[in-house]
Amino acid sequence: MKVYNEILGNMNISPEWKEKLENAEIDYIFLDQWTAQKSRFLGKGVSGEEYPIALARHSQIVDGDIISYDPEANKAVVLRIELSPVLVIDMSALAEKDHDTIIRVSVELGHAIGNQHWPAVVKGTKVYVPLTVDKKVMLSVMETHHIEGITFDFQKGLEIIPYLAPHEIRRLFGGAGHESHSHEHGHIVHAHDHAHDGVTHVHEHTHDGVTHTHEHTHDGTLDNHSHQH
């Protein structure tokens, strides 16, 4: 069975490829947000055919990537990504505020996010939070806190990708990716989630039925700790 180890181009980005595939027979492989972070997996096209994919390590799949094209048969195989929406919190309005207000609002936001155990990625004046529960629930939580000086709304996951580094993409869409690991020892469970460059860190420990969750955000952002006994 042929193994596909190269991205030939992208039908969404390249006008040349878009033109080539305009009348081509395309077998689409739809990937969920976790599979899309992998470089090796078995894809299944809408035709039912399976495609073993083994890309270079740390390859970042983009919606519309082409893994196969046969000009004579006018056929192609294209990867499509189905990403969940992302809650985008805009804090840019705080730039004109005094230091005390900036610190207070940042702490309030950190508490609101940390108290829900939501992971987050910070880029400039925006905070990106992946969809972890129903959208209405997440919006309700934010509205309940009435945090001044910020705006928030959901955006499509594919629209967020261009603004993020690979490790940040994994943080938002990759589930248990390279930045997370968990261990189970008897009745004691430890889960640690680490990230850097403005990304929230989550640590969860369960000992004899007692759960401790710690969230830390670095690069000038206050740490948040949550404990459940």
Image (cartoon, helix red, strand yellow):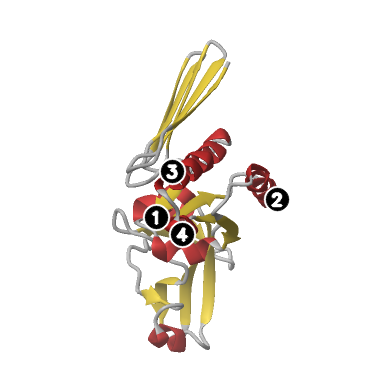
Q: Quadrant of residue 47?
A: bottom right
Mark 2 vs mark 3, CA separation in Å: 31 Å
Give the amino acid at mark 4.
Answer: Ser
Label 1 neighbour load within 10 Å: few <14, some 14-19, many 20+: some
**Residue 226 falls left or right of residue 57:** right
First of labels 3, 1 by sequence position: 3
> Front-most of 197 and 53?
197
Quarter of the image that includes the C terminus: top right
Residue tagged by mark 1?
123
Q: Position of residue 21 (x, y in %)?
A: 47, 84
For the residues labelled 3 and 1, say whether their Cβ atoms are less than 8 Å apart: no
Q: In the orientation shown, which residue stands out farthest toward the top?
A: 208
- Please determine whether, in this image, residue 93 is positioned above or below residue 103: below
In this figure, which residue is indicated by the disc labeled 2? Answer: 136
Q: Quadrant of the N terminus?
A: bottom left
Residue flagged by tag 1: what amino acid is it?
Lys
Point out the tag, 2 or 4, that comes first from the N-terminus. Answer: 4
What residue did someone put label 4 on? 92
State which tag comes first along the sequence, 1 or 4. 4
